[in-house]
Each structure stands twice: as C-alpha cells, then as structure tokens.
Image (cartoon, rainbow, N blue to C red):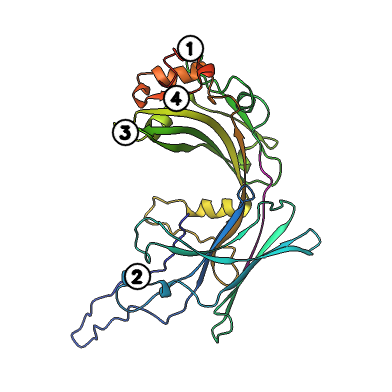
C-alpha cells in the first residue's frame, strides 16, 4: 500500500481596491514540518510495515519538491515497536529496519521507490498492546519524538455452516445446481473486539499462453459490516452467485492470446479492523458535499497519521476445483463466461479426460 501524504497551502489573494495598496502576496507562511506516520499491524502476515514521512512546503513549484526525497524524509530515524502484556510489562521489542520498495506506479512523488520501515514477526498477540516509538533527526538540534499505541482485534469467523462447510467439504462451493443460481450463506461472528468486518472472496487460476504459465488471483470485497449492525455479535450474509460469476468475468483480462485458464481453487475470508482503523476509514471516505470539511483522524502523538491493526481469517477450499462440479460447469459453459476458456487439469474431478471441462 502506498501511503503518500502531502500538505499543500492554498491562499486566495484579494485584489487591491486602491492603486496605493501593495499587491505582494506571501504564499507560504513559516515552515514547520509535521511527522506523517502510517502503520497497520496484521498477524495474518509475517512482515509488518511502517511508513515515516514529513509534510513539506516551500517557495516555488511544490510538484518539484515532491519529487525530491529530502522534502519528505527525516534524517537519523530510530524506531521500534514494543509489546506489552495486560500488566504493562514489556514482553518483546522489535527495532524497525529500513528498506526501499521499488517497482511502484509512476506518480507525483519522488522516483520509482519509497522508503519504509519494517520488522518480521508472524505471531503477534491479540491479548497484548503494541507501542510505536520513533526518534526523528536523532542527535540533532531539531530532534523529534513520535509515538502511538494500538491493540490487535481477535479475528472474526464465518461460522460453521453454509459457505465454510462447503469450502471445507470434498464437493466444493455450490453457486449453481444445474438449473438455477444459488447464494451460499455464512454467518459473521465477532469473537472479540472487532469494529469493522470485511468479507472477501478469492478465486485462483493459472493463465496459459503457449509454454508460459502465470498464476492469477481475483480478489474482491463481498460485503462490509460495522459492529453496530451485528445482533448479539452475529450477522448473516449471502454470497451472491451472480456477483461471483460477474467478478470473474470482469476480473479476467481480455487477452485473445490466452490458450486456456486452469482453475486452481477458491477461498473466502473475513478481515476484522480495530476501532482506530474503523474510525480512520470512516472519516477518510469521500464526501460529495462541497460545503463540508472532512474531519481529521489521527492517533499519532507528535505527528499525524495512523497506527492501527487488523486481523484476517481465511478459509481455503479443500475440493480440487474449489467449486462444485455443477458450479464449475456453469462457469465453463455459460454464455457470459465461456469465452474465458476455463478448464481443469484434474481428470478425476471433472469426470475424465473426455469431459469438456478437462484441459486438453
């Protein structure tokens, strides 16, 4: 995720009413840099990233300043994340390491790379508190201290019936019964202190062009719920079959050079956001009103930004296709998706090598 922050000062000059008035306008006030910090802890991945920048302002073209890394980066950064138990005792600590992330999309900001800070830990604990401590310009006269604190929510679940049961079974998920579309159900269960829940679907396949095989994934948000929408920490949701097939149709590139696409499976998951992340996302959503002013949300002491957490639980289909055979047949034969050239290289799963579902 590219988290790029820039503070721009916009001043509207009022024309002089009398010839004797000065028309000089001071475009920029006294410079004061502000630390901008973004980090989201996630125990479902093993590497945690924190981005540390500063706001900038200068005389002249601010787009040119944005291309200069010195406009955004502090010197002599020392940072760490510490873990504390319920008694306030520090149990673990990780110094943040510097790394440059390359191969970014072209944009306004400097170069083709970004500096971020990271630590590796695959076992973050939802019962602990995590504190971020940063020293900027360490040892210099303009040294700054930035800090923040967050806790990791326990992952919500999708219950045990409907979609999770089908993913865990040997027959696969049923989106079609041979006659009509079906909408598998699931029940989102808040098992801890989650405040925002995102249900997502992942569809896996290999794209084959000649001898070149490229693994692909189509991922989309199926639905989203806030804590207040849950009844006794639960809410039922349907996975809409029409949306499922349409997402595959629109998510696959229209490339006539593709020989075939081999299905590799299906997964569903639920991502749980803590209260800080929920609040930040809520105030960051676009407001279509030209008269309203967007509120600010930050939990960074000594700066701006966000240090929050989320947790993800994923259910990976165990059936060879991920889909029930009738659901897969609909994907292969439907007028809406048959041009996508999906097939399976598992002869047993599709009824033999003579099946039109088998990859020749």
Query: Which contiguous range is marked in magenta?
Result: 146-156
Earlier in the chain: of badge 2 and badge 3, it is 2
- Tag 3 residue: 254
Earlier in the chain: of badge 1 and badge 2, it is 2
Earlier in the chain: of badge 1 and badge 3, it is 1
- Outermost front residue: 211
- Tag 2 residue: 10
Could you tell me which secondary element the residue under label 2 belongs to?
A: loop
Earlier in the chain: of badge 4 and badge 1, it is 1
Label 2: few (<14), some or many (≥20) within 10 Å? few
Q: Residue 262 location, x and y as percent?
A: 44, 28
Mark 4 to mark 1: distance in Å? Answer: 14 Å
Could you tell me which secondary element the residue under label 3 belongs to?
A: loop
Residue 9 or residue 288, whichever sits in front: 9
Q: Quadrant of residue 70?
A: bottom left
Q: Nearer the viewer, mark 4 or mark 1?
A: 1
Residue 75 or residue 228, whichever sits in front: 75
Q: Mark on residue 262?
A: none
- Tag 1 residue: 178
Q: Residue 344 location, x and y as percent?
A: 47, 23
Earlier in the chain: of badge 4 and badge 2, it is 2
Mark 1 to mark 2: distance in Å? Answer: 61 Å
Q: Is residue 99 magenta?
A: no
Q: Mark on residue 242?
A: 4
Question: Is 310 placed above or below 295 here?
Answer: above
Disc 1 vs disc 3: Cβ atoms closer than 8 Å? no
């Amino acid at each position: 995720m590219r988290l790029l922050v820039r503070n721009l000062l916009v001043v509207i000059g009022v024309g002089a009413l009398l010839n004797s008035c000065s028309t000089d306008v001071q475009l920029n006030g006294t410079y004061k840099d502000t630390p901008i910090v973004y980090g989201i802890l996630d125990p479902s991945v093993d590497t945690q990233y924190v981005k540390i920048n500063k706001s900038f302002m200068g005389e002249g073209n601010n787009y040119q300043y944005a291309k200069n890394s010195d406009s955004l980066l502090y010197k002599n950064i020392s940072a760490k994340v510490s873990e504390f138990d319920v008694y306030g005792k520090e149990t673990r600590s990780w110094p943040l390491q510097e790394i440059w992330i390359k191969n970014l999309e072209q944009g306004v900001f400097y170069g083709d790379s970004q500096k971020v800070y990271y630590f590796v830990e695959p076992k973050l604990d939802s019962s602990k508190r995590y504190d971020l401590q940063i020293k900027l310009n360490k040892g210099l006269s303009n040294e700054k201290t930035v800090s923040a604190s967050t806790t990791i929510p326990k992952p919500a679940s999708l219950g045990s019936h409907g979609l999770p049961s089908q993913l865990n079974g040997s027959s696969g998920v049923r989106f079609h019964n041979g006659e009509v579309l079906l909408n598998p159900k699931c029940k989102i269960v808040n098992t801890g202190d989650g405040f925002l829940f995102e249900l997502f679907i992942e569809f896996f396949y290999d794209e084959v062009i000649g001898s070149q095989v490229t693994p692909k994934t189509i991922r989309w948000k199926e639905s989203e719920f806030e804590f207040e929408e849950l009844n006794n920490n639960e809410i039922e949701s349907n996975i809409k079959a029409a949306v499922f097939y349409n997402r595959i149709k629109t998510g696959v590139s229209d490339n006539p050079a593709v020989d075939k696409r081999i299905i590799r499976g299906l997964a569903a998951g639920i991502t749980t956001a803590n209260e800080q992340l929920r609040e930040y996302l809520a105030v960051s959503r676009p407001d279509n009103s030209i008269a309203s002013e967007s509120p600010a949300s930050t939990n960074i002491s000594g700066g701006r930004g966000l240090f929050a957490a989320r947790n993800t639980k994923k259910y990976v289909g165990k059936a060879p296709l991920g889909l029930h055979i009738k659901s897969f047949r609909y994907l292969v034969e439907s007028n809406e998706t048959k041009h996508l050239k999906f097939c399976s290289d598992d002869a047993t799963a599709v009824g033999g090598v003579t099946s039109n579902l088998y990859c020749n």
